[in-house]
Amino acid sequence: MSEISQIWFDEAKKLNVNEAIFVRVASKKEQTKLANEFEEERETFSLIDPVHASQIFINKILKDRKQYVVLERKYRAPFTAFFRGEDGNFSTISVDPERKRMLRLMVKDGKSREEIEATLNGLTDDEIKEFFPE
């Protein structure tokens, strides 16, 4: 990764939703190289803040006969989805990977179900089925 890609990606982290940075490059080869470096920066950033990292999109474009790599922040909620039931109706569902991670670690550490419920303010039916099957 180059210093240029690090500097511009740090600027991209500050973007608000629907804002973009257009980085001009001299050639198609440079465009591809810089876009790949931005992908690496995003991958590293995703270890720290996966939601924010997933909102940063990297595109290669041609604008006014000049080549650019675009860093754009778009709204995205990766831990929310829609569920369609048998009746055809949709409902929103969400997952919390941090909660699941904590639950796994507490079970692995041998914490009691009561202690886990107290820490997590209760358990969902799915969590009980998965971690405390009878």
Image (cartoon, rainbow, N blue to C red):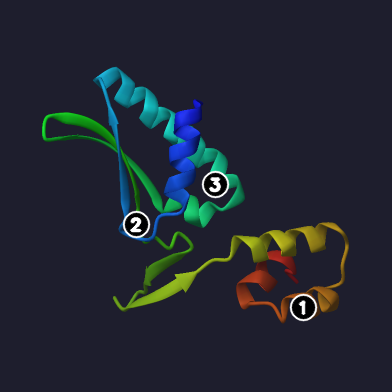
**Mark identifier at residue 117:** 1
Q: Which residue is painted at 61% across and 49% down in the image?
A: 48
Q: Residues within 10 Å of mark 1 (few under 14, many from 20)?
A: few
Q: Nearer the viewer, residue 21 or 36?
A: 21
Count of all numbered marks drawn on residues in the image: 3
- Mark 1: amino acid: Glu
Q: Which residue is mark 3?
A: 46
Q: Nearer the viewer, residue 3 or 72?
A: 3
Q: Residues within 10 Å of mark 3 (few under 14, many from 20)?
A: some
Q: Secondary structure at mark 3?
A: helix
- Mark 3: amino acid: Ser
Q: CA distance from mark 2 to mark 1?
A: 36 Å
Q: Secondary structure at mark 1?
A: helix
Q: Which residue is mark 2?
A: 74
Q: Position of residue 98 (x, y in %)?
A: 65, 62
54 to the left or right of 24: right
- Res 45 quadrant in image: top right
Note whether 62 is above or below 118 in the view shown: above
